[in-house]
Amino acid sequence: MARIAQSTKVLAEGGYEKIFHQSFETTPEEKLEKSYACYLSTSAGPVIIPLHQLKAVNPSTSKTNPAEKYIQVISVDSHEFWFIGFVNYDSAVAVLQEALQSPV
């Protein structure tokens, strides 16, 4: 049911790209590369990490519950972010690791 609600919101607001530009301070030439449904615990609100700011992407699985998968993202200024609850975890890991290897 949550996916239907998310899809309805995305359509109503003009698509992921439009939501991206409304949610974050971006320049007109910036574009959204990929988006994934997941959770991030932060008191600061939505988080954006420009690709050139990525230092590390570390996939992780809970030792007590292998179904719980996480992605730790570390920025070049050593801030850590833990993303959880992915709908498409393997694809998110692959895209983030590819972005880390690609020159920006």
Image: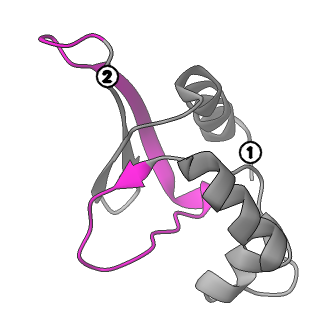
Q: Nearer the viewer, residue 44 or 56?
A: 44
The answer to whether residue 30 is seen in the rendering is no
Reading the image, the residue beneath label 1 is 103
Q: Where is residue 57 shown, x and y percent of the image? A: 44, 35
Secondary structure category for the residue under label 2: strand
As for residue 15 lying within the magenta part, the answer is no
Reading the image, the residue beneath label 2 is 60
Whether residue 95 sits left or right of residue 39 in the image: it is: right
Please give the name of the residue rendered at 69% of the width and 87% of the height, measured from the top-left corner.
22
Colour treatment of the image: one colour
Decide: is 92 above or below 25: above
Q: Where is residue 2 shown, x and y percent of the image? A: 54, 50
As for residue 55 lying within the magenta part, the answer is yes
Please give the name of the residue rendered at 64% of the width and 59% of the height, measured from the top-left corner.
6
Whether residue 57 sits left or right of residue 14 in the image: it is: left
Amino acid, disc 2:
Ser
Q: Nearer the viewer, residue 54 or 17?
A: 17
Viewer-nearest of discs 2 and 1: 2
Neighbour tally class for label 1: few under 14, some 14-19, many 20 plus, Cα within 10 Å: few
Amino acid, disc 1:
Pro
Please give the name of the residue rendered at 83% of the width and 68% of the height, measured from the top-left corner.
11
Whether residue 10 sits left or right of residue 81 in the image: it is: right
Magenta-drawn segment: 39-66
Decide: is 4 above or below 13: above
Q: Earlier in the sequence, mark 2 or mark 1?
A: 2
Q: Nearer the viewer, residue 12 or 79?
A: 12
